[in-house]
Image (spheres, rainbow, N blue to C red):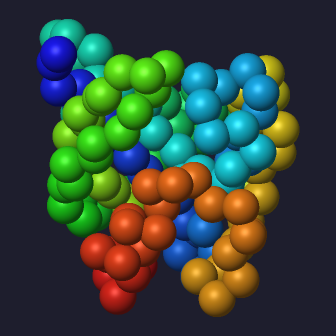
Amino acid sequence: DYTGITVVYFCHDGAGNFLMNKRSPNCRDEHGKWDPGGGGLEFGHTIEDTMKKEIKEEYCTDILGYDFLGYRDVHREHNGEQTHWLALDFKVHVDRSKVSNGEPHKFEAIDWFTLNNLPDELHSQFPRFLELYGERL
């Protein structure tokens, strides 16, 4: 019965390639689905600091630059409970040569894709992300 805030980032290398992770059974949900990346905003932390911290943890790299794309209301169900998240969506430039899987317990794999060659098994919320921002990616 609260609204959470999540920072969602779609990392790119500046050459048309986008980084995604494949969620493992150790993730809360959406096992085996490809996801751009994200993390919940903790009390007292800024949005930018959260994004930097999460990208460093998940992909072992720093941010070279970013663009705020917009926000989405995300209504989902988890363990039979209705959830409401406010997703703050970003396009984030990273150095491809420094990227690695920083959370192998959560990600079965990480890989680079083009928008014309995305994996088949996408996170349930990702098609809406692409619908909203595809022309700006």
Q: Residue at horizontal 59%, vertical 24%? A: 28
In the image, 129: left or right of 110?
A: left
In the image, 137: left or right of 23?
A: left
Count every numbered label the image shows and give the total: 0
Q: Residue at horizontal 71%, vertical 83%? A: 117
> The N terminus appears in which quarter of the rendering?
top left
> The C terminus appears in which quarter of the rendering?
bottom left
Q: Residue at horizontal 60%, vertical 31%? A: 29
In the image, 116: left or right of 66?
A: right
Q: Is residue 59 visible?
A: no
- Residue 123, percent from left and from top: 57, 53
Task: State the residue in front, 63 or 87.
Answer: 87
Q: Is residue 137 visible?
A: yes
In the image, 77: left or right of 126?
A: left
Up-down relation of residue 128 to residue 25 (above or below): below
- Residue 106, percent from left and from top: 72, 27
Query: Which residue lies most toward the front here?
Result: 80
* Figure quadrant of residue 91: bottom left
- Residue 10, percent from left and from top: 48, 58
- Residue 16, percent from left and from top: 59, 82
Q: Residue at horizontal 17%, vertical 26%? A: 3
